[in-house]
């Protein structure tokens, strides 16, 4: 498999991560054989160092440093969120107006990996800016009504909590389609059966920041994959 490189300079390289691909090897997924980090290393012929993460089912902009030294210099910037991240998602229901959700989240612990972690930590600040871009009503039922409504939204997380966007949309009852952990099975099934969409419809579209080495503004954009393009065409939506 060849990864799509969407930005590269002397210090960093960014790819358009495919949905369903792990960023790096994990003992929690012992049977997985494809990882972005190893694939990219083999593709460009040098080691790469992850600066942030994307959940396995999420696609889009993923940035690596090209040396451990560059990673040490840039990691604090990513940890502090000194950048703008833009995501797009398809959610259930219609969101009428833009908003900012300030809803603290308790840390999600993994039963195995976090077995010895402190279980009763306080909820941490979590803030997401969101705005609706387009809506659609489709002639398929998921319950009481003969039709179902969906919305294309843009989200800008101001903090970086685990599964923040998925959990915030769940809190608003506008679950992201394809989310098997925080979503709604009826709507996920509708998209699988009628639109051949078998993925989480969450995409990291753009990452913008001031480059710490060159002091220039960097805008990295990741295009939508085939599943997304099919849905955008089906619903007559554009970005």
Image (cartoon, helix red, strand yellow):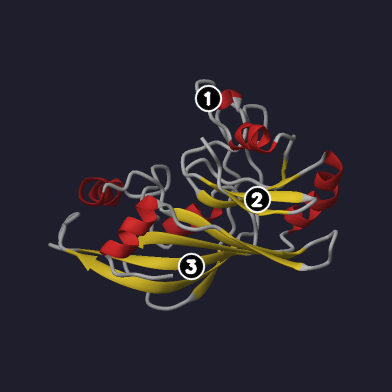
**Residue 224, labelled with which disc?**
none
In the displayed structure image, the side of residue 156 where residue 68 appears, left or right: right
Q: Of the residues under marks 2 and 1, which one precedes in the sequence?
A: 2
Say which element carries label 2: strand
Residue furthest left in the image? 146
Foreground residue, 31 or 216? 216
For the C terminus, the image quarter is bottom left
User: Is there any visible trace of residue 175 in the rendered image?
Assistant: yes
**Residue 154, labelled with which disc?**
3
Residue furthest top in the image? 31
**Residue 33, labelled with which disc?**
1
Residue positioned 48% across, 67% down in the render: 154
Q: Which residue is mark 2?
A: 14
Between disc 1 and disc 3, the foreground one is: 1
* Spatial separation of the CA atoms under disc 3 and disc 2: 21 Å
Q: Is residue 97 above or below residue 198?
A: below
Q: Is residue 174 above or below residue 58?
A: below
């Amino acid at each position: 498999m060849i990864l799509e490189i969407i930005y590269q300079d002397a210090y960093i390289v960014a790819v358009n991560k495919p949905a369903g691909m792990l960023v790096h090897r994990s003992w929690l997924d012992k049977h997985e054989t494809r990882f972005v980090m190893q694939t990219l290393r083999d593709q460009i012929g040098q080691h790469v160092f992850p600066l942030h993460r994307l959940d396995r089912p999420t696609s889009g902009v993923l940035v690596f440093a090209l040396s451990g030294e560059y990673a040490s210099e840039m990691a604090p910037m990513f940890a502090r969120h000194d950048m703008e991240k833009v995501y797009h998602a398809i959610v259930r229901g219609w969101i009428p107006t833009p908003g900012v959700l300030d809803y603290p989240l308790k840390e999600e612990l993994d039963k195995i990996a976090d077995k010895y972690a402190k279980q009763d930590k306080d909820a941490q600040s979590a803030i997401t800016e969101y705005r609706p871009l387009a809506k659609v009503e489709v002639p398929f039922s998921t319950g009481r009504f003969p039709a179902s409504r969906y919305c294309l939204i843009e989200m800008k997380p101001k903090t970086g909590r685990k599964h923040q966007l998925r959990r915030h949309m769940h809190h608003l009852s506008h679950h992201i389609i394809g989310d098997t952990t925080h979503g709604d099975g009826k709507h996920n099934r509708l998209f699988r059966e009628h639109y051949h969409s078998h993925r989480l419809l969450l995409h990291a579209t753009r990452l913008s920041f001031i480059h710490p080495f060159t002091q220039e503004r960097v805008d990295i954009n990741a295009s939508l994959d085939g599943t997304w393009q099919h849905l955008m065409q089906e619903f007559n939506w554009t970005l």
